[in-house]
Amino acid sequence: MNNHTVYICAGSNIGDKVDNCVKGIEALKEAEGVTLALQAKFYKTEPVDYKDQEWFVNTVVKIETGLDPFQLLNLLKEIEQDAGRTKAPVRFGPRVLDMDIILFDDEVINGDELEIPHPRMHKRCFVLRPLCDIAPDISHPVLKKDMEQLLSSIDDNDQKVIEYTWD
């Protein structure tokens, strides 16, 4: 089985946000054919696009897997459903758990069900900030810029990202 290097963003803004992300990552780790390699810090992040909702908690994990991109997508959807995620009434609205494939090796996929690299990752501080914790030097396979370059090119004022601290 071929091992692929994959980066996944996990986020939540309903209920115990950190715990929702932790449980999603645990379910991912326990899945057959998946090994957790690295995890970024947790961040409190301002909502993007649909602003009238609670702030999110986000992190990024690096996994090694023998699954293909579509098998992994199905696994992530199962994990989200098991966490209690339902079809959101509002696009980019509140969610118990959101897990997205950000990068899958250097693959580029432009399908109806799946786009890799994630089509908005380069515009999202909540993805790039934690991704820079664990992989600042990896290159975006389409834009040919590393994650630090992409992060520094975003106007931060619209997207607050604060390292999560436990009170």
Image: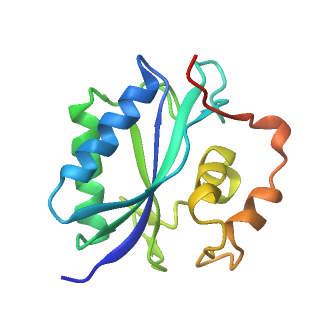
Q: Residue at x 69, y 72 (%)?
A: 146
**Count of marks, rendered view:** 0
Q: Position of residue 138 (x, y in %)?
A: 61, 74
**Image quarter hosting the C terminus:** top right
Of 153 and 89, the residue lying toward us: 153
Q: Toward which corner of the image does residue 157 lie, by quadrant?
A: top right
Q: Position of residue 80 (x, y in %)?
A: 29, 38
Residue 96 seen by the camera: no
Residue 162 seen by the camera: yes
Q: Residue at x 85, y 47 (%)?
A: 155
Q: Residue at x 55, y 22 (%)?
A: 166
The colour scheme used here is rainbow
**Image quarter hosting the N terminus:** bottom left
Of 116 and 27, the residue lying toward us: 27
Instruction: In the displayed orientation, state which residue is furthest to the bottom.
Output: 2
Q: Position of residue 27 (x, y in %)?
A: 23, 44
20 left or right, relative to 72? right
Of 130 and 107, the residue lying toward us: 130
Position of residue 123 relative to residue 65, above or below, is above
Q: Position of residue 2 (x, y in %)?
A: 25, 83
Q: Toward which corner of the image does residue 98 lie, by quadrant?
A: top left
60 left or right, relative to 35? right
Position of residue 85 relative to residue 52, above or below, is below
Q: Residue at x 67, y 30 (%)?
A: 46
15 left or right, relative to 119? left
Instruction: In the displayed orientation, state which residue is furthest to the front.
Output: 167
Q: Toward which corner of the image does residue 67 lie, by quadrant?
A: bottom left
Position of residue 25 relative to residue 101, above or below, is above
